[in-house]
Image: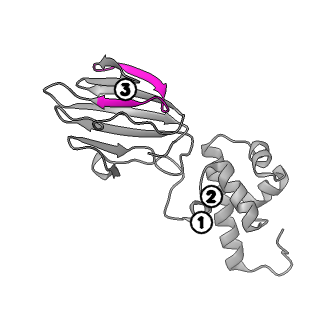
Amino acid sequence: MTDRSSPNPFADAADAALGGRIREYRTMRRMSLRALGETAQASPGFLSQLERGQANCSIGMLRRIAVALGVTVADLFDQNSEPGPRVVRRADRPMLHTAPGSRKFLISQRPLSHLEVYAGEFDAGGSTGDDAYTHGDSQEILLVISGAVRVELDGRAHDLGVGDSIEYRSSVPHRVVNNHETSAEILWIISPPTPD
């Protein structure tokens, strides 16, 4: 804990801002002080003081708190990032490199760390590539928003239309192809996140 016998107003403001960000991330995740404390190896009383700007902590403790909240230490200090609801406009979605005839956009934004959501757009004849691929061993759900696609899972084909979904492990070789004459749009939901 900080010695408050000769308070520094600048340090107090920084501690209060950091504590407020920790509290916002914790409440956004519906975590109690006790649950955060168990994961970060800190007492609920200490965390309460930290959130109110009445204590400070080591970098090691901040790292444990950040991991428990699913954010980075930098996120805890970033005043430009709002922990509450965030709108991502279609035109502002980060685009990932994909095969010709398809586009993949990241929908879920940091500090969300328990799942990933991607939007996929497939022109007529577009696909995720010529070969099936795998990534980690997570639960993956694919939902067709518009058009129709064929999902190939370990050599078996599944034709899906609007509103249809399929669930599989990301460790199973999979491929998506739009073999129709109109474009298609899908959502991928992956938990936990895996590297592409």
Residue 100, percent from left and from top:
21, 44
Q: Are marks 2 and 1 in contact (CB under 8 Å)?
A: yes
The N terminus sits in image quarter: bottom right
Residue visible at 50% across and 51% down in the picture: 110
Q: Quadrant of residue 196?
A: top left
Q: Which mark is residue 143?
A: 3
Membership of 166 in magenta stretch:
yes
Residue nearest the observer in this picture, 122 or 45? 122
Residue visible at 64% across and 45% down in the picture: 27
Residue nearest the observer in this picture, 55 or 143? 143
The segment highlighted magenta reads: 161-176
Residue at far left of view: 181
Is the image coloured rainbow, by chain, by secondary structure, or in one colour?
A: one colour
Of helix, strand and loop, which one carries label 3?
Answer: strand
Looking at the picture, which amino acid does disc 3 mark?
A: Leu
Q: Does residue 176 appear left or right of residue 87 in this picture?
A: left
Q: Which mark is residue 77?
A: 1
Q: Please determine whether, in this image, residue 70 is positioned above or below residue 175.
A: below
Looking at the picture, which amino acid does disc 1 mark?
A: Phe
Q: CA distance from mark 2 to mark 1?
A: 8 Å
Of helix, strand and loop, which one carries label 2?
Answer: helix
Earlier residue among tags 1 and 3: 1
Looking at the picture, which amino acid does disc 2 mark?
A: Arg
Q: CA distance from mark 3 to mark 2?
A: 34 Å
**Pointer 2 residue:** 21
Nearer to us of marks 3 and 2 is: 3
Residue nearest the observer in this picture, 173 or 160? 173
Residue visible at 79% across and 66% down in the picture: 55
